[in-house]
Image (spheres, rainbow, N blue to C red):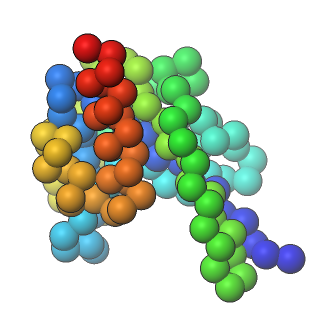
Amino acid sequence: MKKEIIKAKVVIIEKGKVLLLKRIDREKRLSFAGGIVKSNESHKEGLIREIKEELGVKVSKQDLEYIFSFKKKKAKVKITTRYYRLKTTNKKFKINEPNKFNLLKWFNIKYAISNVTKKQGFILKQQLNLHKNAS
């Protein structure tokens, strides 16, 4: 039986910009906040914990809106990553784990698309199109 890993990531967009982190151990890539969901947590509970750990803010389940999931299978592992949008952005975000991250910054979405993973770029393109259609 394959081991299953569940990850949850948060997309935070405000005024045409997206909030991204840069990990110390990854030179070029930017990323959404989030991480691995523990076995005793729901997806949202794990993401709420990760947001608090990484960005130093409290959010509720109601603040998170499901966007999309990706599934990836490796030899002995099945990885599912669920993406959520943070509906309220009136928070004071900060790097809460300076041993893991060295940058937290608002980026233009079009710039960010080419500086995140392909899957995260897909999510950003989707969000950009939704924003355009809503205008």
Which of 119 and 55 lies nearest the eye of the viewer?
Answer: 119
Identity of the residue furthest to the front in this view: 133
Compared to 7, does 26 lie above or below? below
Identity of the residue furthest to the bottom in this view: 75
Number of marks present in the image shown: 0
Q: Is residue 99 visible?
A: no
User: Left or right: where does residue 65 sit relative to residue 32?
Assistant: right
Which of 54 and 82 lies nearest the eye of the viewer?
Answer: 82
Identify the image quadrant of the N terminus: bottom right
Q: Position of residue 68 (x, y in %)?
A: 54, 42
Q: Residue at x 17, y 45 (%)?
A: 110
Q: Position of residue 92 (x, y in %)?
A: 24, 26
Identify the image quadrant of the C terminus: top left
Q: Position of residue 24 (x, y in %)?
A: 24, 68
Q: Position of residue 104 (x, y in %)?
A: 19, 47
User: Left or right: where does residue 50 sit relative to residue 61?
Assistant: left
Q: Residue at x 20, y 41 (%)?
A: 109
Identity of the residue furthest to the top in this view: 135
Q: Is residue 67 visible?
A: yes
Q: Residue at x 57, y 55 (%)?
A: 70
Q: Residue at x 61, y 51 (%)?
A: 37
User: Left or right: where does residue 103 sit relative to residue 9?
Assistant: left
